[in-house]
Amino acid sequence: MTVYVSQSAFWGLLISAVEVYKRECFGLLIGYRDRRGPQETFIVEHAIPYQTSRRRHKGVESNPRAHRRIERFLRSIPQLSVIGDFHSHTMWGYSRAANHPSETDLEGMRPENAYLIVGVNDRLREVPWNYNDDGSLSGTTDDHHFRLTAYTVTGAREPRRLPILCPYAIGFDARPLRAVK
Ligand SMILES: [Zn+2]
């Protein structure tokens, strides 16, 4: 299983995380599951921040009534549904953001969904956007370092990392190695 992040979702994740930095953001992943033979992909078309979540440094509280309203609304759009959620983990003092799900995060996860954790830290140096060996995606903007990690859970509530695919992120700050003629 892979998590494909569209250009719109990529910016949604980063902007939501930066807006409330150094608090945590929380929002919904909207898209669809694409199954081709044995290969299943979560296609994340949009990452929509929750305006009604209460933000604290450690953890955010979701709003179940708002969540149900959004799910009902999406029923009228056949190709899109809520396929998971996202939240950020941020730097606090000198301790840098961790990218693994907390116990509370795990309690809210369901095996049929995908979850993205956006780790945000102050930028120390410029790092080009790239995939990491653990399937996560990381890189920098002017002020921040981001690491996007995707998870799902097994039936026994064990977290499983899912590789992220985001061709847009890899391309958006890539510099050509030589001039293209
Ligand atoms: Zn968390």
Image (cartoon, rainbow, N blue to C red):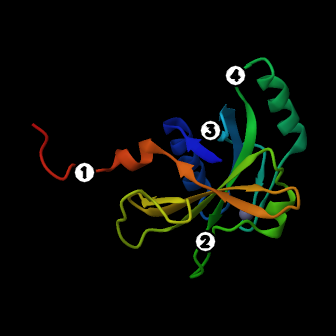
Q: Disc 2 or 1, which lies upstream in sequence?
A: 2
Quadrant housing the C terminus: top left
User: Would you say 85 lies left or right of 121 here?
Assistant: right
Find residue 171 and report its image quarter: top left
User: Would you say 135 lies left or right of 123 here?
Assistant: right
User: What amino acid type should be assigned to the residue bearing mark 2?
Assistant: Ala
Residue extending farthest to the left is 181
Q: Disc 3 or 4, which lies upstream in sequence?
A: 3
> Disc 4 designates what residue?
79
> Disc 1 designates what residue?
175
**Spatial separation of the CA atoms under disc 3 and disc 1:** 26 Å
The reply to whether callout 2 and callout 1 are in contact (CB within 8 Å) is no
Crowd around label 3: few <14 · some 14–19 · many ≥20 (10 Å): many
> Disc 3 designates what residue?
44
User: What amino acid type should be assigned to the residue bearing mark 4?
Assistant: Gln
Find residue 84 and report its image quarter: top right
> Disc 2 designates what residue?
97
Expressed as whole percent of the image width and height from the top left, the position of residue 163 reads 58, 54
Q: Disc 2 or 3, which lies upstream in sequence?
A: 3
